[in-house]
Amino acid sequence: MAKEMLGAKCGVPLPNGLVESSNSKKPIFAPSTKPKKNLPEENITFERMEKIVGKEKECLKG
């Protein structure tokens, strides 16, 4: 099975040539939410995460 080439995760651009399960030089913050019981997690953008937890969590930007 060929590995999937990745371009972005949760709206964040990823380094060129990164494939599934490969290492990244920097940590990748990939927020997600679980909308309802028995449903899978949903990847969300940083902006949507800010709306959920509030912009005062600016320290999450790193």
Image: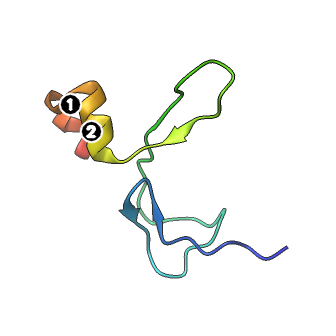
Q: Residues within 10 Å of mark 1 (few under 14, many from 20)?
A: few
Q: Which mark is residue 60?
A: 2
Q: Identify the amino acid type marked 1.
A: Lys
Secondary element type, mark 1? helix
- Residue nearer the viewer, 7 or 18: 7
Identify which residue is drawn at 27% across, 26% down. 53
Residue 5 circle label: none
Crowding near pointer 2: few (<14 within 10 Å), some, many (20+)? few
Question: What is the x, y in percent for residue 16?
Answer: 47, 81
- Identify the residue under disc 1: 57
Q: Would residue 61 be found to the left or right of residue 29 on screen?
A: left
The x and y percentages for residue 50 are: 25, 35
Q: In this view, does 27 lie above or below 59?
A: below
Q: Quadrant of residue 19?
A: bottom right
- Residue 35 in percent (x, y) is at 52, 26
Q: Residue at horizontal 24%, vertical 45%? A: 61
- Which image quarter: residue 13? bottom left
Give the CA separation, mark 1 to mark 2.
6 Å
Residue situated furthest right in the rendering: 1
Establish if 23 lies above or below 45: below
Q: Locate residue 31, reporting x and y percent.
A: 43, 40
Answer left or right for 51 relative to 19: left
Residue 52 higher or lower than 25, as above or below:
above
Q: Which amino acid does label 2 sit on?
A: Leu
How was this image coloured? rainbow
- Above or below: residue 45 compared with residue 18: above
